[in-house]
Amino acid sequence: MNELSTPHNPPAAPARPRRSSFAIVDWPLGLWSRLENRRRRHKARQQFARIDARTLRDAGISEAQRFILCEL
């Protein structure tokens, strides 16, 4: 017996992972959220690709960096 388990205080049983009752209901929302994030990132990359070279230079971003960011 260790110091935490005594005859009056037996060791606790290991906790079983509990399955959420909302897991089945929440997956469509999670899927929708991931698709929405993907759509927003795609739109942002398209807008970034349309920025003119002068604005990029002012922001300190090279054409090569823009190319890499837009291809992700």
Image: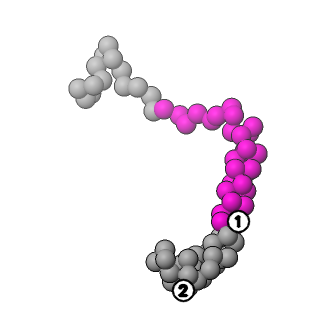
How many C-alpha atoms fall within 10 Å of the one at disc 2: few (<14), some, or many (≥20)? few
Quadrant location of the N terminus in the rendered image: top left
Q: Quadrant of residue 47?
A: bottom right
In the shown orientation, is residue 17 left or right of residue 7?
right
Does the magenta segment cover residue 27? yes
User: Residue visible at 70% across and 65% down?
Assistant: 43
Say above or below: 17 vs 7.
below
User: Residue visible at 69% across and 72% down?
Assistant: 46
In the shown orientation, is residue 35 left or right of residue 48?
right
How many C-alpha atoms fall within 10 Å of the one at disc 1: few (<14), some, or many (≥20)? few
Task: Say whether disc 2 or disc 1 marks the residue closer to the N-terminus.
Answer: 1
- Single out the residue that lies furthest toward the top: 8
**Circle 1: residue type:** Lys
> 11 or 57, which is in the foreground?
57
Q: Which residue is mark 2?
A: 64
Q: Main secondary structure of the magenta part?
A: helix
Where does the image place residue 61, in percent across and percent down from the top left? Answer: 50, 78
